[in-house]
Image (cartoon, grey):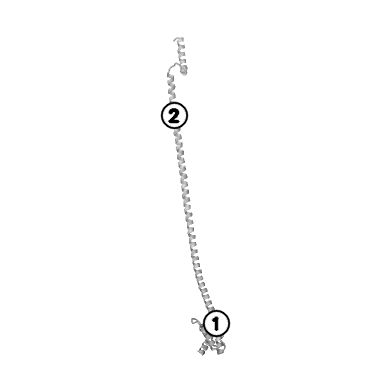
Amino acid sequence: MSENEQQNVSRETARTPIEARRGGSAGDPPEDVSRETSVPLKKGKGSSFFIYLAVLFGAAFLMLLLAYFVQQRNSDAALDNLRMTSNASKEELLEELQALEAEREELEAQIRELELDLKQEQSLSQDFQALYDGARTSAAHLEYTLLQRTQAMELLWQLERAYAQRDYDTCQAFIHWLEMPEANPRKDFLPTEEDREQYDYGLDGSTPAERYQEIVEKLS
């Protein structure tokens, strides 16, 4: 090979890479190579994106699951507290009901005691009323008896005076007054032997009733 041919070959070989970089006339083969090398790069980026999404989804799922367990735990704790509070409330309510029942029984016992005292007071009041009524009746009867006895003694004294004066008509008038009224004559109120301790019957010792009966027999 001559020296001119070697120079031409060296120029062609040197020109080929330059044209390939500049997109010269070296032809289509360089473009095909660049396209083939770019396709694997795009596929690698897509796979990384899906992996990233899967990781995010997994992390979100784990966060939701964790939140669910935390919420479930809080709910269980709240239910336990509610049960404990409910049990405590029931116990307190039961204790309060027992206290109220004891208080009610105590009040009922006090009421029964007061009713018994009231009955006793009523019985005492009735007894006192009966005694008071009896005392009033006795006092009224005694007052009536003393009044009738005073009148009878006054009539007897006038009868004895008229008898001593031999005024027999006046004696009959006083006897008539002593015999009245028929249902309860005044002569019955003259002191008798039973009343000897209360009266002084004079020297002869005869009672007013006996002296009256003696005058009546003498005038009949």
Query: CA gap, disc 2 to disc 1?
Result: 151 Å
For image coordinates 44% across by 24% down, the residue present is: 38
Q: Nearer the viewer, residue 132 or 8?
A: 132
Give the x, y percent position of residue 45: 45, 28
Q: Is residue 110 above or below residue 154?
A: above
**Callout 1 crowding tier (Cα within 10 Å): few <14, some 14–19, many ≥20:** some
Give the x, y percent position of residue 195: 53, 83
Query: Residue 128: which numbered mark, if any?
Result: none
Give the x, y percent position of residue 135: 53, 75
**Callout 2 crowding tier (Cα within 10 Å): few <14, some 14–19, many ≥20:** few
Disc 1 is placed on an element classified as helix
The mark total stands at 2
For image coordinates 48% across by 54% down, the residue present is: 93
Which amino acid, by three-letter code, is at mark 1? Gln
Comes first in the chain, label 2 or label 1: 2
Give the residue at mark 2.
Answer: 46
For image coordinates 46% across by 41% down, the residue present is: 67
Disc 2 is placed on an element classified as helix
Give the residue at mark 1.
Answer: 151
Which amino acid, by three-letter code, is at mark 2? Gly
Q: Is residue 60 visible?
A: yes
